[in-house]
Amino acid sequence: MFSHIMVGADNMAASKKFYDAVLGTLGHPEGNIDDKGRCFYFTPTGIFSLSTPINGDPACGANGGTVGFAAASPAEADAWHQAGLDNGGTTLEDPPGERPDAGLYLAYLRDPSGNKICALHQLG
């Protein structure tokens, strides 16, 4: 359904460092910076990217929005979460863990620009 997701970043170096770390725990290579200063993470199923806002306003997290990344296991989601904390992210919502009512293992972070992201592993 989706071809790509792009989120805003005020500090591209800090954001790239953060996403290189968290996406690296999920097995993705480092992002590539293009000639316009945007950062792209290419995968077989889609593209995740970072860009400074083209209107010149500060980047901000989408109110009510979350970008979710698939984790192969709860341990991978935990490693993703820790990599985010170690590279400028902040935790939010409940601690990483099972949500038995939903059959999910979730870990939430805010990136250095305030975007809300999640690692999700489907249990069972």
Image: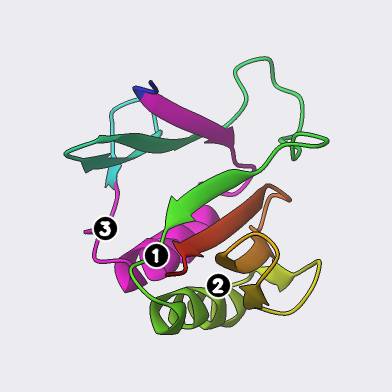
Query: What colouring does the structure picture have?
Result: rainbow
**Which callout, 1 or 2, points to the residue nearer the camera?**
1
Q: Is residue 71 above or below residue 65?
A: below
Q: Is residue 60 above or below residue 98?
A: above
Circle 1 sits on which residue? Answer: 71
Which quadrant of the structure image shows residue 71? bottom left
Residue drawn where x is 24% and y is 36% of the image? 45
Give the tally of numbered discs: 3
Which quadrant of the structure image shows residue 72? bottom left
Q: On the picture, is 3 further left or further right than 44? A: right
- Helix, strand or loop at label 2? It is helix
| Magenta stretch, residue numbers | 4-31
Q: Amino acid at mark 1?
A: Ala
Judge the density around disc 2: few (<14), some (14-19), many (≥20) Cα neighbours within 10 Å: many
**Which callout, 1 or 3, points to the residue nearer the camera?**
1
Sequence-wise, which precedes: disc 1 or disc 2?
A: 1
- The percent coordinates of residue 55 (x first, y second) are 68, 15
Q: Using the image as rendered, state which of residue 47 and residue 74 is in the foreground.
A: 74
Circle 3 sits on which residue? Answer: 30
**How far, Cα to Cα, is label 1 from label 2?**
14 Å
- Helix, strand or loop at label 3? It is loop
Whether tag 2 and tag 3 are in contact, CB under 8 A, the answer is: no
Circle 2 sits on which residue? Answer: 84
Residue drawn where x is 55% and y is 72% of the image? 84
Judge the density around disc 1: few (<14), some (14-19), many (≥20) Cα neighbours within 10 Å: many
- The percent coordinates of residue 48 (x first, y second) are 39, 38
